[in-house]
Image (cartoon, rainbow, N blue to C red):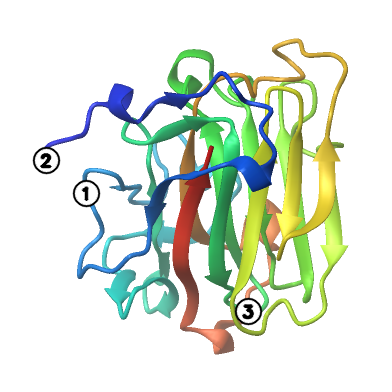
Amino acid sequence: MRRINAILFFILISSATLSAQERELVWEDNFDGENLNSEIWNFELGDGCPNLCGWGNNELQIYTEKNHELKDGLLTLTARHENDGYSSSKINTQGNLEFQYGKIEVKAKLPTGKGLWPAFWMLGSNIKEVGWPLCGEIDILEYVGKEPETIFTTLHTADSHGSSINTRKDVVKGIEEGFHIYAIDWTKDKIDFYIDKKLFYSFLPKNKSVEVWPFDQPFYMILNVAIGGNFGGAEVDDSIFPQEFVIDYVRVYQ
């Protein structure tokens, strides 16, 4: 597989404090083709073993390529319950497409049901060198089926991870109905989290040490549907499957 040199996609602008209204679209994927762009998206496969069994959260699913589909301009990640357990899909842009600062958003329709855990999130590109959580993590969208109509936005750092204090949990009526837009507005000073253009949470620490603010470097994007686990919950309702996490687009403005 030919990969695009990550340097070509490392976009760092000096005017990092531009308002969202002044930014321009620099990258998007509308999922218009029949296949994922393999020069951008990587699949994460299996159960995370031997290095990260259960993907670090005691999750139940096996990730495969067969649980995704592109059709009619939509990317669908499907969670299934099969005879041999649970399956789903997880994709990322690591090494291919990484961004530092900007407005980053996804338009998506959530799967529902107890045990599901869809997410759109980002990890620092230096994760292989420094590990997690020192690399930093930006959870733009997390939803767990055991808590209907609730959206989580969280930042994980070396200073605050696991039961992070840098988080917001909001009840959003009707969030499971149709498509909604989840976004961050990320500058050198702060990160704002939005749902359907409404500001829900801001992280603006005065202390910018590496333990508190690892967000001064490129990050890559991740889309997945986990099942069960520490956050998704030990109880899974097998009657809900299959369930679909449907993504209309991913966009980056700078």
- Residue at position x 56%, y 18% from top? 14
The residue that disc 1 covers is 38
Q: Is residue 147 visible?
A: no
Seen in the picture, residue 253 relative to 250 is either above or below; the reply is above
- Residue at position x 87%, y 37% from top? 165
Seen in the picture, residue 151 relative to 25 is either above or below; the reply is below
Amino acid type indicated by mark 3 = Thr
Seen in the picture, residue 78 relative to 4 is either above or below; the reply is below
Name the disc covering residue 204, or none. none
Q: Are marks 1 and 2 in contact (CB under 8 Å)?
A: yes
Measured Cα–Cα span from mark 1 to mark 2: 8 Å
Disc count in the image?
3
Q: Which one is nearer the viewer's eye here, 229 or 108?
A: 108
The residue that disc 3 covers is 112
Quadrant of the rendered image containing residue 102: top right
The residue that disc 2 covers is 1
Quick one: quadrant of the C terminus?
top right
- Residue at position x 62%, y 34% from top? 137
Quick one: quadrant of the N terminus?
top left
Seen in the image, is 69 located left or right of residue 162? left
Q: Give residue 212's position: percent from left, percent from top.
A: 77, 19
Q: Give residue 252's position: percent from left, percent from top.
A: 50, 46
Disc 2 crowd rating (10 Å Cα; few below 14, some 14-19, many 20+) is: few
Work out which residue is located at the far left of the displayed protein and give it.
1
Disc 1 crowd rating (10 Å Cα; few below 14, some 14-19, many 20+) is: some
Measured Cα–Cα span from mark 2 to mark 3: 35 Å
